[in-house]
Image (cartoon, grey):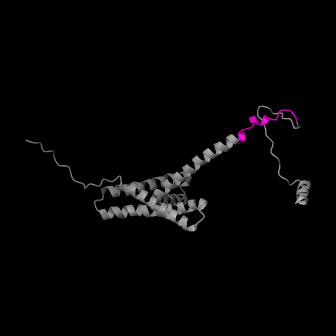
Amino acid sequence: MSAVFCLQTELGLHAPQLRLVSVSCSELRRGGGGRRDWYIYAHGATTMLALGLAINTLGIGLFCWAIFALAVYALSFFVALSIGMTTFRSGAGLIGAVLIATAGGALTLVLGQVAVAITRSLALRIAIATAFAIPAAVAGYHVWFALSQIGVPSLVWREVFACLGAVCIGVTSWTRLIVPAETRPFEPRRGVESPS
């Protein structure tokens, strides 16, 4: 082992040693003796570590929220993506493709919500809501399966988490489409009768 260490030091392959740097005292002594408490001014690494952890936690939370929002609106997102790619290939340019894709995705969502709201037939409401919920559940399954690969070593538990994620996101998509619609039947207004 000592031969390996000597060989590494002769070739210059050993790890560099870290040296504390102070902002307030730029000229640190390299020799021995004297006061050795200059390191109290060099706490930038600790601050950056704490700040990095806080920002990473916020970023991961924002990333998970964005993935969840896209998974809930999977059908509208897929329609917008298809329209955008088709528009871009037809020569509309990047800005035109983004604008038309955004309008197409929003129109898909609005038409689905309006169709559920004005339809009286329960079977048709369920069919429209299912058309929005199934792509959301599939997207939710894949998102949760990919996220569970980060910290879950067992394949069985990854599948369990992915199925739970699919159910949660599918139900959320279903709820966001059905809840704005009023559940009472439509009745035309009649004249107000005055009590006599």
Left or right: 3, with 90 as reference point = right
In which quadrant is the N terminus drawn?
bottom right
* Residue 3 in sight in this render: yes
In the depicted view, which residue is nearer to us: 94 or 8?
Answer: 8
Residue 91 vs residue 48, the one in the foreground: 48
| The stretch drawn in magenta includes residue 34 | yes
**Count of labels in the image:** 0
Coordinates of residue 65 in the picture (x, y in percent): 52, 51
**Picture quarter with the C terminus:** top left
Residue drawn at 26 percent across, 54 percent down: 184
The furthest residue to the bottom: 156
Residue 177: percent from the left, percent from the top?
A: 38, 56
Left or right position of 110 against 95: left
Residue at the (39%, 56%) spot, across then down: 175
Which residue is painted at 28% across and 59% down in the image? Answer: 120
Tell me if I can see residue 111 in this picture: no
Asked if residue 67 is positioned above or below residue 158 in the image, the reply reads: above
Q: Which residues are magenta?
A: 33-45
Q: Is residue 44 left or right of residue 129?
A: right
Residue 161 rendering spot, x and y as whole percentages: 52, 62
Task: Find the residue positioned furthest to the top.
Answer: 24
- Judging depth in this view, the residue of 127 and 6 nearest the camera is 6
84 falls in the magenta region: no
Q: Residue at x 17, y 49 (%)?
A: 190
Q: Residue furthest left?
A: 196
**x, y percentage for residue 39?**
77, 37
